[in-house]
Image (tube, rainbow, N blue to C red):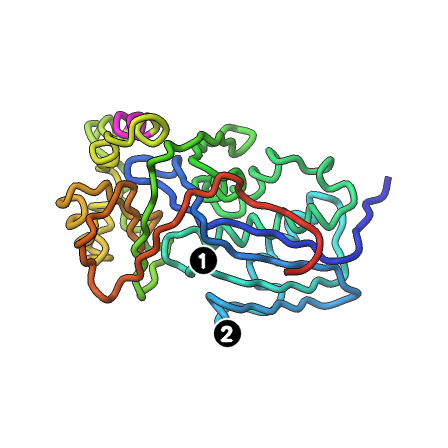
Amino acid sequence: MPTTLTSGPVRVRVPATSANLGPGFDALGLALGRYDDVTAEVTDGGVRVAVSGEGAGELPADERHLVVTAMRAAFDVLGVQPAGLALECVNRIPQARGLGSSSAAIVAGVLAARALVADGGRRMGDDAALRLAAELEGHPDNVAPCLLGGFTIAWTESSGARAVSLPVASTVRPTVFVPAERGLTAEARAALPATVPHADAASNAGRAALLVHALTADPALLLPATVDRLHQDQRAPGMPATAALVGALRGAGVAAVVSGAGPTVLALSEVPAGFDPGTQWRRWELPIDVSGARVSRGRL
């Protein structure tokens, strides 16, 4: 049976995410209540991308846009390539700050393409969408919470990425501190050593397991549960302000970590009312997104 494209626009809303959460390197992630909206429609030819908000005037407006790249990859899997595409991107997730902007773009593209195919849900289920998104991103820790919502544990098997989403204790209310400067995931990964001491790996395994319990059942344990020995100290020389803020927050008893590859800082426990991070940080208290990416018909 030939693949049929649908007419009219589809809209995808994707949440910001924070990955690693301290000890859960490349495995743990959290969906946060700040969103990008993408509206996509099939056209007779060419690619047009209009961007407003974060990244406006900087991101490409053609085939090079990451949402389009993800859509093209998804259309390949779905067995059809439209002649043209028109996209409207309303971005609220800061670019290159460790809040999953690239994962949001990838998930939005995969889901938009699926929604523009008449039987896309049958041809590509959620498990397949996760595998494709993780393949495009390179690791599943951000795409999993973006797609599924909540607190996610992701892993990779021979068939590709898999993930589960767990409910978070109601008293966990994240705060993010977003700096003006940007960071690059590739540079942050390059700062990591090729091997790690067995003691450090064992420490992180225990803390990551404790973090699952702390986030879902006992937030009083979040401070010890967020101790990391695999990546944050190794990356600290490249983002000293981030490392200093994490240290100051933890010194005040706050379960603070580097969000993803940084430079944003994520606090998982309450920040004291009088704590002053400095004027270079935007402070946002964000709810946990429990729904993940959402698809609807029509425009914004």
The amino acid at mark 1 is Ile
The residue where tag 2 is placed is 57
Q: What kind of secondary structure does the magenta stretch mostly adopt?
A: helix
Q: Around disc 1, counting alpha carbons within 10 Å, would you say few (fewer than 14), some (14 to 19), or many (20 or more)?
A: many
- Residue found 68% across the figure and 66% down from its top: 47
- The answer to which quarter of the image holds residue 30 is top left
* Residue 207 among magenta residues: yes
Give the extent of the magenta segment: 205-211
Per the image, label 1 sits on a secondary structure element best described as: loop
Q: Position of residue 148 (x, y in %)?
A: 52, 38
Give the mark nearest the N terminus, 2 or 1.
2
Along the line of sight, the residue nearer the viewer: 154 or 156: 154
Farthest-out residue, front: 273
On screen, residue 91 versus residue 218, left or right, reads right
Q: Position of residue 39 (x, y in %)?
A: 64, 59
* Residue 222 among magenta residues: no
The amino acid at mark 2 is Gly
- Residue found 23% across the figure and 40% down from its top: 255
Which numbered disc covers residue 93?
1
Q: CA distance from mark 2 to mark 1?
A: 15 Å
- Residue found 35% across the figure and 51% down from its top: 285
Q: Position of residue 92 (x, y in %)?
A: 47, 60
Per the image, label 2 sits on a secondary structure element best described as: loop
Tag 2 and tag 1, C-beta contact below 8 Å: no
Q: Quadrant of the C terminus?
A: bottom right
- The answer to which quarter of the image holds residue 133 is top right
Q: Around disc 2, counting alpha carbons within 10 Å, would you say few (fewer than 14), some (14 to 19), or many (20 or more)?
A: few
- Residue found 45% across the figure and 37% down from its top: 150
On screen, residue 239 versus residue 53, left or right, reads left
Nearer the viewer's eye, disc 2 or disc 1? 1
Q: Position of residue 154 (x, y in %)?
A: 45, 33
